[in-house]
Amino acid sequence: MDARFDNTFGKRLKLLRMDKGLTQDELAQKMREDHGVAVGQNYISEMERFNKIPSGGIVAAMAKALGTTTDYLLMVSNAPTPPAHQEASYA
């Protein structure tokens, strides 16, 4: 991931999605099917352009779908890879 462009939630989201080889629609589908969070491709596009601010539940599902942490997406941490010993615990 290119650290020069990861200074906003939207940019981090887009870079992680692209690193995983997912389209916006594929990410939306993965979030629906794997994590029960219904968002559409347009909503993901709006988040990547920082026109929409997601709820905590959406951020959690997105982090899980992308194999990262909410802290990374929300710019609390600069480590995109979650620690191996942590388990996600959201409904």
Image (tube, helix red, strand yellow):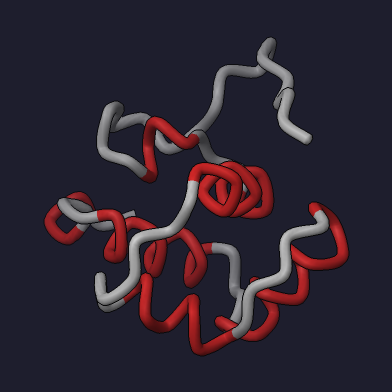
Q: Residue at x 51, y 67 (%)?
A: 17
Percent x, y for residue 27? Answer: 65, 72
The spot of residue 78 in percent (x, y) is: 28, 32
Q: Nearer the viewer, residue 45 or 55?
A: 55
Image coords of residue 81 (percent x, y): 50, 33
Answer with the quarter of the image where residue 47 lies: bottom left
Name which residue lies at 59% across and 83% down: 23
Q: Residue at x 34, y 71 (%)?
A: 52
Q: Quadrant of the C terminus?
A: top right
Q: Nearer the viewer, residue 35 or 5?
A: 35
Q: In the figure, 15 relative to 41: above or below?
A: above
Residue at 49% x, 80% y is 43
Which quarter of the picture shows residue 13? bottom left
Towards the viewer: 30 or 85: 30
Q: Residue furthest top?
A: 85
- Extreme residue in the front direction: 55
Q: In front: 25, or 18?
A: 25
Please give left or right for residue 51 compared with residue 67 in the image. Answer: left
